[in-house]
Image (spheres, rainbow, N blue to C red):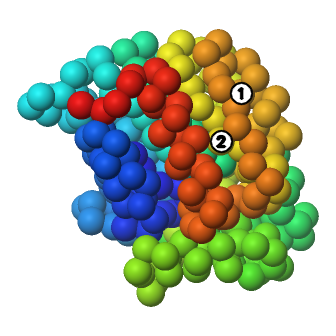
Amino acid sequence: MAHGLGGVKAGGLHAFAARFQQAGYACLVFDYRCFGDSEGAPREWLDIRRQREDWRAAIACARSLPNADPDQVILWGTSFAGGHVMAVAAGDPRVAAVIAQCPFTDGLASTLAVDPLTSLRITVRALSDQVAAWLGMGPVRVATVGQPGSVALMNSRDGLAGHNAILQAAGLDHVPIDVPARIALQILLDSPGRQARHIQCPALFCVCDKDTVAPAKATLKHVKNAPKGEVIRYSAGHFDIYVGDDFERNVSDQLAFLARHFGTGH
């Protein structure tokens, strides 16, 4: 289990892990390199290739644990990590199942969901950061989340309030939200949803119809191609299914999916 764009495991994932553990499943929840409790510099460095390498390392770790069945590893990812688990599972036939909630599936669709002027300002900052990296200079940063109209990767009307509600529910006051801006160039070109057709294991896609970050229309177009895919839709926004009643419905559906395919946990 791992978090989405710029998130850390302490920021809301323990609520899900606790429910899975209560049902008998073992959970390995991790922070990507450069985030949270993990080492690495520059801090909060977002990189798609590196994060997917971290997923593969976490899977290898899970498969090596005592009393773990290496062929019963289930990947759980939310938001940005929802795209990661799709891409990783497509290349690993031993993965037993996938749960992807409000998944990032289409970089172009997510970019177009941002105001064009803001996208332009983010792109200028991203190019500046990439040049700085080539020259060996420190990163030029951008916020992952901010108020509408601000230069932030997620600046929808529900973004900052939703982000803060997740942190509050997790008992956190603050986590760093500024990341090297070059990630914006990677996001635009990435489309992990295209890998859905290659996922051979059971896969549950929890899609928020009011998603302002990972638009539901693009996600539904991609995940319908998963051979063993199941889709559950929620009349909720991108940040809603982490807390409150939407969380309860969401996690209950995920537990039901696991029970159908694996019975009770061991």
Give x and y (percent) for residue 14: 37, 60
For disc 2, the marked residue is 206
**Relative depth, front residue between 203 and 107:** 203
Task: Identify which amino acid the numbered label 1 is placed on.
Answer: Val
Relative to 182, residue 169 above or below: below
Mark 2 → mark 1, Cα distance in angstroms? 10 Å
Q: Residue at x 82, y 29 (%)?
A: 221
| Residue found at the far right of this picture | 116
Mark seen at residue 112: none
Q: Quadrant of residue 39?
A: bottom left
For disc 1, the marked residue is 223
**Relative depth, front residue between 145 and 68:** 68
Q: Quadrant of residue 122?
A: bottom right
Q: Residue at x 39, y 23 (%)?
A: 262
**Relative depth, front residue between 137 and 158:** 158
> Disc 2 vs disc 1: which is toward the camera?
2
Q: Would residue 39 appear left or right of 129 to someone viewing this image? A: left
Task: Identify which amino acid the numbered label 2 is placed on.
Answer: Cys
